[in-house]
Image (tube, helix red, strand yellow):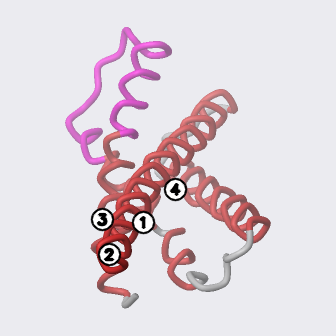
Amino acid sequence: MSFKEYFFKKIIPNYFMIVTLITIGIAVSGILFYGNRSISLVTLFVPPIFGALGCLPMLLDFAFLKVKSSGLGLVLYNAVELVLLEAVILTAAYFLGMINSILTALITAVMVFAIFTAVGAVMYIQDKKFCDDLNNALADYSAKKCK
């Protein structure tokens, strides 16, 4: 798979899922913890920026596309990707002045973990559906070929 194909088939859909889930996460945490505050319009740029930052560890995914073939390799790869993602997001949020307490950092870290898990689950469901459809098509083809 070329980088261009990988970019349009994996990174772009993940970007939009991440941005959507970040927006929902910001809304929920804002309502729960900062319900009496109003936000500026600059805040609307936060989900796209952090969505792009959230896609950076996927470049590592492209580099190791052929390496993670075993179950243990996949688990270790996902753990490394999650640690990188947490580091990128928390570092960026700290330097942008969004993290001003341990509680805010903890909420952000939990939100990153939840978004990482949700995006991974959606991608797994999509990939499984595609594989099941492909297997069914191959079974139908071989059944017709053998008759």
- Dots 3, 1 in contact, CB < 8 A: no
Image point (67%, 77%), residue name:
69
Q: CA distance from mark 3 to mark 1?
A: 26 Å
Q: Could you tell me which secondary element the residue under label 2 belongs to?
A: loop
- What is the tally of numbered marks visible in this picture? 4
Does label 4 or label 2 sit earlier along the sequence?
Answer: 4
Image point (51%, 46%), residue name:
121
Return the residue at label 4.
92
Please, is residue 87 above or below residue 116 in the view? Answer: below
Q: CA distance from mark 3 to mark 4?
A: 21 Å
Q: Residue furthest bottom?
A: 2
Does label 1 or label 4 sit earlier along the sequence?
Answer: 4
Amino acid type, mark 2: Lys
Return the residue at label 2.
147
Q: Could you tell me which secondary element the residue under label 3 belongs to?
A: helix
Q: Which range of residues does the magenta coloring cover? A: 21-45
Amino acid type, mark 4: Ala
Label 2: few (<14), some (14–19) or many (≥20) C-alpha neighbours in 10 Å: few
Residue 30 part of the magenta-drawn span: yes
Which mark's residue is nearer the viewer, 1 or 2? 2
Q: Nearer the viewer, residue 19 or 107?
A: 19
Which mark's residue is nearer the viewer, 2 or 3? 2
- Residue 14 in the image: x percent, y percent? 37, 58
Which mark's residue is nearer the viewer, 3 or 1? 1
Q: CA distance from mark 2 to mark 3?
A: 42 Å
Q: Could you tell me which secondary element the residue under label 1 belongs to?
A: helix
Q: Residue furthest front?
A: 147
Please, is residue 107 above or below residue 68 in the view? Answer: above
